[in-house]
Amino acid sequence: MKGQPPRPALHTILLATLLFGCDPGRPNWDAPIEGPARPRSQVAATENARSEVGQALGTTVADASKVVLFGDLHIHTTYSFDAYLFSLPLMGGEGAHPPNDACDFARYCANLDFYALTDHAESLVEETWESSKESIRQCNDVAGDPTDPDVVAFMGFEWSQAGTTPETHFGHRCVFFRDTADEALPTRPIGARADTEILASARDNIGMMRMVTPWNWQQYTDYMKYVTTVVDQPMCEEGVPVRDNSAQCKDVSPTPQGLREKLDDWGFDARVIPHGPAGGMYTPATTRIDKHLDPAMFDPERQLLVEIMSGHGNSEEYRPWREWTVDADGNRECPEPTEDYLACCWQAGEIMRSRCRDLPAEECERRIVEARKFATEAYIRPQQVFPDAPREAWLDCDQCRDCFKPSFAYRPLESIQYAMTLTRDDATGPDGKPLRFRYGFVGSSDGHSGRPGTGYKAVERGMMTDVTGEPSAITMMAQDYMGRMENPQQPLRPEPGRIRLSGNDLRVSNFLYPGGIAAVHSAGRSREKIWDAMQRREVYGTSGPRILLWFDLLDGDQRVPMGSQVMRADTPLFQVRAAGAPVQKPGCPDWVHEGMSVERVSRLCRNECNNPGDERHPISAIEVVRIRTRSTAGEPIEQLIEDPWKRFDCAPDPAGCAVSFEDEDFVSDGRDSLYYVRAVQTETQEIIGAGLGTTFDDQGRAISIDWCEPGSACLGPSQERAWSSPIFVDYGPPDAPPA
């Protein structure tokens, strides 16, 4: 039929089968949890080593009753639509990694203390939801004594909302539950959208790929069946209590308000963690986090924590530049480049300028203006204006040049620092104060290969990050075909309905890092104790390494730990204690090989486990950030965020670093403030340590980027770090009790 791809001849299929062997179909989907509980001696030795470091830095009686535990609260398996797609041969994938792999990787490869399974709710059907729950229960069953397990596995899902405009975008949130019994978990997850069009398009594309690569026929057929199951899932009936709907239906709530109401309806103890808020891969340009403080949208009792760092980058830092602005008449204006920032709308104009060639000067300038205008309308896909332009042509537009491991296409008005300045005087939170974000900070991986807790070593980029292997030649040809333009000298106006369906920016892979880590100061290893630590916000995040960090407000003989909220009218005094992550030894410990088969250690861990030695990386500095909340709507943001407010250089001592400081201005300022600290390690060589590696000319203009190919390690200098949760100090009369 005209317009359809040609069908391969039968002899072609037979020849391909002979040349490439039988297609394995769905390999590794049924791999069982293999490893028993880790040796108790190994778990105890790890805890004792952390406690000894704390004691050397001045651990108090209160500290001694707690242990620092590390985990990952954001992990995807191939039950997620995108993870399954990345696992296919056409994407350079290595095959399936179902939930059972996550359990063994967490315990044996990453040596974690806890993790949460958070596959995309939009991709889950009854079969995969039930299978995920069963895997989590099995993982907890083999973990040993529930009061002292080797790992705690939490069950959850990701609510993946992505609006096409700043007004309709709310972002992604990981939801997980304290308990794992059937009666303590929802019958089905809660998604943000149906994704029918995106999934159906992916299924059709895979169908075409199956025709031209018949040696992978069964793998692609299995994927198509999976997608069809998701697409054909009926929608739940609106306005019906959650328990009255069928287990087979797809439950969708497109706003945070709907998510909160459904969680209220279920009534289970849950945590909701926003993740990657400043990342622009799916966040429209100029999006502001302000609307999340709408009382109808905010859920402060569940939403106690925020993901400050993941394998998709850091969302901490505020910057004053903007992707574009709006003038008094409502017209969008593209900012000129500065030393700190190059807007993609501006670079779209420069790409047009390079293509003018024989065009009259006046017409060239008109098209430059047009290209910039069209780029402001693309929100997350400005490259659709020139889809045939190579990735190098866009330079480092829309990226934060001076952020630590920044998220791709950084959105400063979605950053955590910006969020912490906001307040709603017309609404109050659970503490009776004006509604604010009172987040504790965690890191996690957001990995898509069923591997929680990556980032412990600067090896195996394809395992530690979401970068897959080299895409197939056919895939690259297809991308080139889709990027063709009839007239390369005429910028294209993106179609609003297709902004999210095509034109992915290939520079994204240079912003995929080893995953972050969540740490808790817990009174024990049990599920209940870890949950309580998260409830207290006595948590912190790292960029991946297992850095140890304590941050306290000193109140006489008492210590008020990170995450606390207090009211006082005297000068607050703080103490920080930090020690770097252990220096890693190559390979895996002996107990890993004793607990899992050679094949499983090779496939899951790639024979490189978290294998700490006795020496630790020194801490080079302690940085303190002070943020005041807005007292008036027009108060300049730049005056409220002091980063760093104080910096203390540390001696290069592997034993760690301890400093104290006070805020001499707190009483005279008389306003609420929050404080958090960064413990910064000495420089090491890390995966994607140098980012895009932009080169500048003598005038400070970007002229090239140093592209990192998927098959390369791309090690570069980096100072890994840990972020404490804030201590919120509200100004109040001396006799006011702590909040």
Image (cartoon, rainbow, N blue to C red):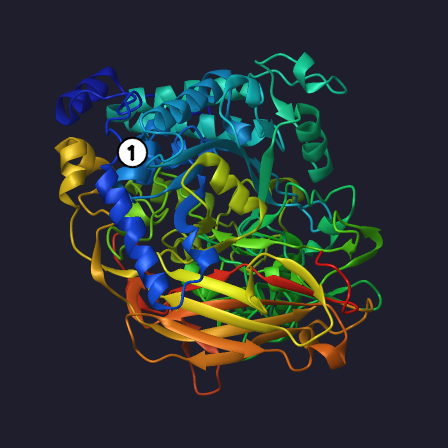
**Residue at x 74%, y 20% (from the top left corner):** 238
Q: Residue at x 67, y 42 (%)?
A: 301
The residue that disc 1 covers is 104
Residue 739 at what x, y percent from top left? 71, 56
Say which residue appears at 33% left-offset and 27% top-offset.
100
Q: Nearer the viewer, residue 161 or 628?
A: 628
Q: Is residue 452 left or right of residue 352?
A: left
User: Front-most of 601 and 55?
Assistant: 55
Percent x, y for residue 716? 30, 67
Q: Position of residue 85 (x, y in %)?
A: 40, 33
Q: Is residue 208 left or right of residue 8?
A: right
Q: Residue at x 16, y 27 (%)?
A: 20
Residue 557, can we see it?
Answer: yes
Q: Residues within 10 Å of mark 1 (few under 14, many from 20)?
A: many
Above or below for 498 versus 611: above
* Circle 1: residue type: Asp
Taking depth in this image into account, of 36 and 525 the one nearest to the observer is 525
Q: Is residue 731 left or right of residue 280?
A: right
